[in-house]
Image (spheres, rainbow, N blue to C red):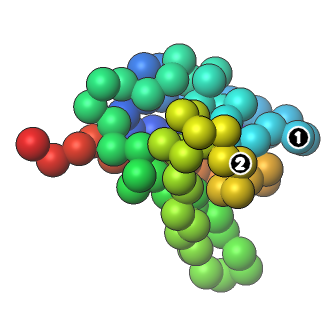
Amino acid sequence: RVRITGAVNNPLSIPYRRGLTILDFVLEAGGLTPFANADKALLYRQEGKELRAYPVELKEILSQGNLTTNYSLLPSDIVAVPERSF
């Protein structure tokens, strides 16, 4: 399974599909809420015994088409989109 949580319109946990990317997953989750902090999103990935966190620049992906951090997802990945501080 792969999961997306936080400030998305429809948090999801779906079966892993080969070729699924961060952008695909955010769109499947209905996009970001108005309160999302797109600059602070993280991809959590288990690598051996270590849980690693990779920054995801969702603002760059969604508004500027910069796909540098549009990672392909792997089984057990979690994408977390935090809310902005007011």
**Percent position of residue 28, x then y:** 64, 21
Q: Is residue 34 visible?
A: yes
Is 55 located above or below residue 39 in the figure? below
Q: Residues within 10 Å of mark 1 (few under 14, many from 20)?
A: few
Query: Which residue matches tag 2?
Result: 67
Q: Residues within 10 Å of mark 2 (few under 14, many from 20)?
A: some
Question: Seen from this angle, which residue lies furthest left?
Answer: 86
Residue located at (61% from left, 81% from top) = 50
Residue located at (85% from left, 36% from top) = 17
Residue 19 numbered tag: 1
* Quarter the N terminus occupies: top right
Residue located at (71% from left, 31% from top) = 24
**Percent position of residue 72, x then y:** 79, 50
Callout 1 secondary element? loop
Which residue type carries mark 2?
Leu
Callout 2 secondary element? loop
Is 74 located above or below residue 10 in the figure? below
Question: Seen from this angle, which residue lies furthest right?
Answer: 18
Horizontally, residue 57 falls left or right of residue 72, namely left
* Quarter the C terminus occupies: top left
Is 49 located above or below residue 39 in the figure? below
How far apart in space, not on screen, are marks 2 and 1 (Cα)?
A: 14 Å
Residue located at (66% from left, 39% from top) = 65
Residue 51 numbered tag: none
Q: Nearer the viewer, residue 1 or 38?
A: 38
**Between discs 2 and 1, the one toward the N terminus:** 1
Horizontally, residue 19 falls left or right of residue 84, namely right
Horizontally, residue 21 falls left or right of residue 23, namely right
Which residue type carries mark 1?
Gly
Q: Nearer the viewer, residue 62 or 9?
A: 62
